[in-house]
């Protein structure tokens, strides 16, 4: 999968099927919403965007669809301290920058090899299954 391009409906269906799930119009539109505007929305923000295109959808359905997309490794959950969970369709290794003034979140590409360098610093006998790097701050004046 190329994370910067939206997956076709058939590819999305196959990825869901590989995880034992079927594609639904709700999952398809939610995935589309996440890949169109890559701004790390919360479930409530996804709900508001989807509601414009699918007025009968419920917030519970949005949460269930987001969970299914996370389970199938189609999107990642991003958490900032006690804030609401946000959703990121970029599956390449990357960091995040969270602007504490505006609340915006941006993907930060990492130099090749950086994650391996960081993992090499783990205690002997340990390996990391996941690494999350988050920068927090604000625009420079």
Image (cartoon, rainbow, N blue to C red):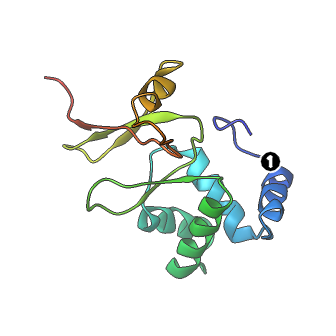
Residue 61 placement, left or right of 24: left
Query: In the rendered image, which quarter is residue 67 located in?
Result: bottom right
Residue at the image point whose x is 80% and y is 69% from the top: 20
Q: Is residue 110 visible?
A: no
Q: Secondary structure at mark 1?
A: loop
Task: Give the percent coordinates (x, y) of residue 36.
Answer: 59, 45
Pick the front one: 35 or 51: 35
Q: Which residue ends up furthest to the top in the rendered image?
A: 112
Q: Is residue 120 visible?
A: yes
Reading the image, the residue beneath label 1 is 8
Residue at the image point whose x is 61% and y is 81% from the top: 56
Task: Give the percent coordinates (x, y) of residue 62.
Answer: 56, 72
Residue 23 placement, left or right of 115: right
Q: Which quadrant is the C terminus positioned in? A: top left
Task: Give the percent coordinates (x, y) of residue 61.
Answer: 59, 78
Q: Which residue ends up furthest to the front in the rendered image?
A: 125
Query: In this rendering, is residue 60 above or below 23?
Result: below
Query: In this rendering, is residue 99 above or below 84?
Result: above
- Residues packed near mark 1 inside 10 Å, few (<14), some (14 to 19) or many (20 plus): few
Residue at the image point whose x is 79% and y is 56% from the top: 15
Q: Which quadrant is the N terminus positioned in? A: top right
Query: In the rendered image, which quarter is residue 121 located in?
Result: top left
Pick the front one: 139 or 118: 118
Task: Give the percent coordinates (x, y) of residue 7.
Answer: 75, 45
Residue at the image point whose x is 62% and y is 70% from the top: 65
Residue 95 placement, left or right of 135: right
């Amino acid at each position: 999968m190329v994370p910067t391009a939206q997956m076709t409906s058939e590819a999305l269906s196959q990825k869901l099927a590989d995880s034992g799930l079927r594609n639904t119009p709700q999952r398809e539109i939610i995935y589309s919403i996440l890949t169109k505007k890559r701004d790390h929305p919360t479930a409530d923000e996804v709900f508001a965007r989807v509601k414009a295109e699918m007025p009968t959808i419920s917030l519970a359905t949005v949460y269930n669809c987001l969970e299914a997309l996370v389970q199938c490794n189609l999107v990642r959950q991003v958490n900032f301290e006690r804030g609401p969970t946000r959703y990121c369709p970029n599956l390449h290794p990357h960091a995040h920058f969270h602007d504490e003034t505006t609340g915006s979140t941006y993907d930060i590409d990492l130099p090749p090899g950086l994650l391996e360098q960081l993992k090499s610093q783990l205690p002997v006998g340990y390996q990391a299954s996941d690494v999350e790097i988050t920068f927090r701050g604000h625009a420079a004046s």
